[in-house]
Image: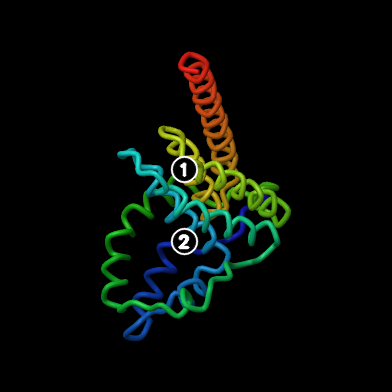
Amino acid sequence: MPTRSRARTSTLLRKLAEGAGERIAIDELVGVLEDRAFGILVLCLALPNAVPGPYIPGFSAIFALPIMWLGLQLALGFSYPRLPGLVRRRSFARARFLRFVNRATPLLSRIEAWLGPHPGWLTETRGHRVLGLVLVVFGFGLSLPVPLGNLPVAIGISILALGLIEEDSRALRWGLLSGLLGCLWLLALVGFGVAVATRLSRYFG
Protein backbone atom coordinates (compact mmCIF):
# COMPACT_ATOMS: atom_id res chain seq x y z
CA MET A 1 0.00 0.00 0.00
CA PRO A 2 1.60 3.33 -0.97
CA THR A 3 2.44 5.78 1.76
CA ARG A 4 0.88 9.20 1.25
CA SER A 5 2.82 12.41 1.74
CA ARG A 6 2.50 13.74 5.29
CA ALA A 7 4.14 16.81 6.77
CA ARG A 8 6.36 16.14 9.75
CA THR A 9 5.13 17.29 13.16
CA SER A 10 8.38 19.16 13.78
CA THR A 11 7.88 21.08 10.51
CA LEU A 12 4.33 22.08 11.43
CA LEU A 13 5.38 23.26 14.89
CA ARG A 14 8.25 25.34 13.49
CA LYS A 15 6.02 26.96 10.85
CA LEU A 16 3.49 27.85 13.54
CA ALA A 17 6.18 29.27 15.82
CA GLU A 18 7.75 31.36 13.06
CA GLY A 19 4.50 32.64 11.55
CA ALA A 20 2.33 33.28 14.60
CA GLY A 21 1.54 36.54 16.33
CA GLU A 22 2.74 37.59 19.76
CA ARG A 23 0.72 34.86 21.48
CA ILE A 24 -0.35 31.35 20.43
CA ALA A 25 -3.63 29.88 21.73
CA ILE A 26 -4.12 26.17 22.45
CA ASP A 27 -6.99 26.22 19.97
CA GLU A 28 -4.63 27.48 17.25
CA LEU A 29 -2.10 24.76 18.05
CA VAL A 30 -4.74 22.02 17.88
CA GLY A 31 -5.98 23.44 14.57
CA VAL A 32 -2.51 23.23 13.02
CA LEU A 33 -1.82 19.71 14.30
CA GLU A 34 -5.34 18.45 13.36
CA ASP A 35 -5.62 14.65 13.74
CA ARG A 36 -2.17 14.22 15.28
CA ALA A 37 -3.21 16.48 18.18
CA PHE A 38 -4.75 13.39 19.80
CA GLY A 39 -1.41 11.64 19.86
CA ILE A 40 0.54 14.65 21.12
CA LEU A 41 -1.91 15.33 23.96
CA VAL A 42 -1.99 11.66 24.99
CA LEU A 43 1.82 11.50 24.88
CA CYS A 44 2.15 14.58 27.10
CA LEU A 45 -0.28 13.04 29.60
CA ALA A 46 1.35 9.59 29.60
CA LEU A 47 5.02 10.58 29.85
CA PRO A 48 4.93 11.76 33.50
CA ASN A 49 3.89 8.22 34.46
CA ALA A 50 6.27 6.51 32.01
CA VAL A 51 9.32 7.82 33.86
CA PRO A 52 10.33 5.82 36.96
CA GLY A 53 9.91 7.73 40.19
CA PRO A 54 8.57 7.57 43.75
CA TYR A 55 5.01 6.35 44.15
CA ILE A 56 2.57 9.22 44.86
CA PRO A 57 -1.04 8.13 45.57
CA GLY A 58 -3.48 9.68 43.11
CA PHE A 59 -0.73 11.08 40.83
CA SER A 60 -1.51 8.77 37.89
CA ALA A 61 -5.26 9.43 38.05
CA ILE A 62 -4.68 13.15 37.36
CA PHE A 63 -3.31 12.21 33.93
CA ALA A 64 -5.35 9.05 33.32
CA LEU A 65 -8.77 10.73 33.35
CA PRO A 66 -7.93 13.16 30.48
CA ILE A 67 -6.44 10.22 28.53
CA MET A 68 -9.73 8.35 28.94
CA TRP A 69 -11.64 11.47 27.80
CA LEU A 70 -9.47 11.80 24.68
CA GLY A 71 -9.79 8.06 24.00
CA LEU A 72 -13.57 8.34 24.17
CA GLN A 73 -13.52 11.15 21.61
CA LEU A 74 -11.31 9.08 19.32
CA ALA A 75 -13.68 6.11 19.71
CA LEU A 76 -16.61 8.34 18.74
CA GLY A 77 -14.86 9.26 15.50
CA PHE A 78 -13.80 12.83 16.26
CA SER A 79 -11.15 14.05 13.83
CA TYR A 80 -9.49 16.35 16.39
CA PRO A 81 -9.77 16.78 20.17
CA ARG A 82 -12.67 18.78 21.59
CA LEU A 83 -11.32 20.70 24.55
CA PRO A 84 -13.15 22.83 27.13
CA GLY A 85 -13.35 26.50 26.20
CA LEU A 86 -11.18 27.50 29.15
CA VAL A 87 -8.40 25.23 27.87
CA ARG A 88 -8.79 26.24 24.21
CA ARG A 89 -8.49 29.94 25.06
CA ARG A 90 -5.30 29.50 27.06
CA SER A 91 -2.33 31.03 25.26
CA PHE A 92 1.38 31.47 25.69
CA ALA A 93 3.96 33.87 24.32
CA ARG A 94 5.32 33.12 20.86
CA ALA A 95 8.91 33.52 22.09
CA ARG A 96 8.31 30.90 24.78
CA PHE A 97 6.75 28.52 22.25
CA LEU A 98 9.67 29.05 19.86
CA ARG A 99 12.14 28.13 22.61
CA PHE A 100 10.13 24.97 23.28
CA VAL A 101 10.15 24.06 19.56
CA ASN A 102 13.91 24.64 19.35
CA ARG A 103 14.47 22.27 22.29
CA ALA A 104 11.96 19.65 21.12
CA THR A 105 12.91 19.56 17.43
CA PRO A 106 16.09 17.40 17.82
CA LEU A 107 14.15 14.75 19.78
CA LEU A 108 11.19 14.92 17.40
CA SER A 109 13.51 14.58 14.42
CA ARG A 110 15.07 11.42 15.87
CA ILE A 111 11.63 9.95 16.51
CA GLU A 112 10.49 10.89 13.00
CA ALA A 113 13.57 9.21 11.53
CA TRP A 114 12.60 5.96 13.27
CA LEU A 115 8.84 6.20 12.84
CA GLY A 116 6.83 7.35 9.86
CA PRO A 117 3.60 6.83 7.94
CA HIS A 118 3.07 3.08 7.68
CA PRO A 119 -0.54 2.42 6.62
CA GLY A 120 -2.61 -0.37 8.10
CA TRP A 121 -6.10 -0.85 9.43
CA LEU A 122 -5.06 0.75 12.72
CA THR A 123 -4.30 4.03 10.91
CA GLU A 124 -7.77 4.09 9.34
CA THR A 125 -10.94 5.51 10.90
CA ARG A 126 -12.18 2.15 12.19
CA GLY A 127 -8.76 1.43 13.64
CA HIS A 128 -8.73 4.79 15.41
CA ARG A 129 -12.11 3.97 16.95
CA VAL A 130 -10.68 0.72 18.31
CA LEU A 131 -7.60 2.56 19.60
CA GLY A 132 -9.88 5.05 21.32
CA LEU A 133 -11.60 2.27 23.24
CA VAL A 134 -8.21 0.77 24.06
CA LEU A 135 -7.04 4.12 25.45
CA VAL A 136 -10.11 4.23 27.69
CA VAL A 137 -9.24 0.78 29.06
CA PHE A 138 -5.52 1.56 29.40
CA GLY A 139 -6.37 4.90 30.99
CA PHE A 140 -8.55 3.15 33.55
CA GLY A 141 -5.68 0.79 34.34
CA LEU A 142 -3.34 3.76 34.67
CA SER A 143 -5.70 5.42 37.14
CA LEU A 144 -5.59 2.52 39.61
CA PRO A 145 -3.51 3.30 42.71
CA VAL A 146 -1.26 0.25 42.45
CA PRO A 147 2.44 0.73 43.35
CA LEU A 148 4.75 -0.44 40.52
CA GLY A 149 1.70 -1.06 38.33
CA ASN A 150 1.38 2.19 36.35
CA LEU A 151 4.77 2.37 34.63
CA PRO A 152 4.27 -0.48 32.07
CA VAL A 153 0.78 0.76 31.14
CA ALA A 154 2.08 4.32 30.71
CA ILE A 155 4.86 3.08 28.42
CA GLY A 156 2.29 1.26 26.26
CA ILE A 157 0.14 4.41 26.06
CA SER A 158 3.20 6.49 25.11
CA ILE A 159 4.07 4.13 22.24
CA LEU A 160 0.45 4.23 21.06
CA ALA A 161 0.58 8.03 21.12
CA LEU A 162 3.74 8.06 18.98
CA GLY A 163 2.05 5.71 16.52
CA LEU A 164 -0.95 8.04 16.33
CA ILE A 165 1.26 11.06 15.74
CA GLU A 166 3.20 9.45 12.90
CA GLU A 167 0.40 7.19 11.57
CA ASP A 168 2.72 4.22 12.03
CA SER A 169 0.81 0.94 12.31
CA ARG A 170 3.96 -0.84 13.52
CA ALA A 171 4.29 1.46 16.54
CA LEU A 172 0.57 1.12 17.18
CA ARG A 173 0.85 -2.67 17.29
CA TRP A 174 3.81 -2.45 19.67
CA GLY A 175 1.86 -0.01 21.82
CA LEU A 176 -1.11 -2.36 21.97
CA LEU A 177 1.12 -5.26 22.97
CA SER A 178 3.04 -3.23 25.56
CA GLY A 179 -0.14 -1.83 27.05
CA LEU A 180 -1.77 -5.27 27.19
CA LEU A 181 1.26 -6.73 28.97
CA GLY A 182 1.17 -3.75 31.32
CA CYS A 183 -2.49 -4.41 32.14
CA LEU A 184 -1.73 -8.09 32.78
CA TRP A 185 1.10 -7.06 35.10
CA LEU A 186 -1.32 -4.70 36.84
CA LEU A 187 -3.87 -7.49 37.30
CA ALA A 188 -1.14 -9.77 38.68
CA LEU A 189 -0.18 -7.13 41.25
CA VAL A 190 -3.81 -6.63 42.25
CA GLY A 191 -4.30 -10.40 42.58
CA PHE A 192 -1.13 -10.67 44.65
CA GLY A 193 -2.25 -7.83 46.90
CA VAL A 194 -5.68 -9.39 47.42
CA ALA A 195 -4.09 -12.77 48.25
CA VAL A 196 -1.71 -11.20 50.78
CA ALA A 197 -4.52 -9.18 52.36
CA THR A 198 -6.69 -12.31 52.64
CA ARG A 199 -3.91 -14.30 54.30
CA LEU A 200 -3.17 -11.50 56.73
CA SER A 201 -6.83 -11.11 57.63
CA ARG A 202 -7.09 -14.83 58.33
CA TYR A 203 -3.88 -14.80 60.34
CA PHE A 204 -4.84 -11.85 62.53
CA GLY A 205 -8.59 -12.50 62.42
As drawn, the residue found furthest toward the top would be 203
* Nearest the eye: 58 or 49: 58
Classed neighbour count for the residue bearing mark 2: other residues with Cα under 10 Å, few (<14), some (14–19), many (≥20) = some
As drawn, the residue found furthest toward the right would be 126
Instruction: Please state if 183 lies on the left or on the right of 54 as rendered.
Output: right
Provide the residue designation for mark 2.
8
| x and y, in percent, of residue 122 in the image | 66, 48
**Amino acid type, label 1:** Ala
**Amino acid type, label 2:** Arg
Which mark is first along the chain, 1 or 2?
Answer: 2
Q: Is residue 30 above or below residue 5?
A: below
Q: Secondary structure at mark 1?
A: helix
| x and y, in percent, of residue 39 in the image | 52, 56
As drawn, the residue found furthest toward the bottom would be 21
* Nearest the eye: 84 or 110: 84
Instruction: Please state if 16 lies on the left or on the right of 101 as rendered.
Output: right
Q: Is residue 184 above or below residue 92?
A: above
Q: Which mark is residue 154?
A: 1
Q: Are marks 2 and 1 in contact (CB under 8 Å)?
A: no
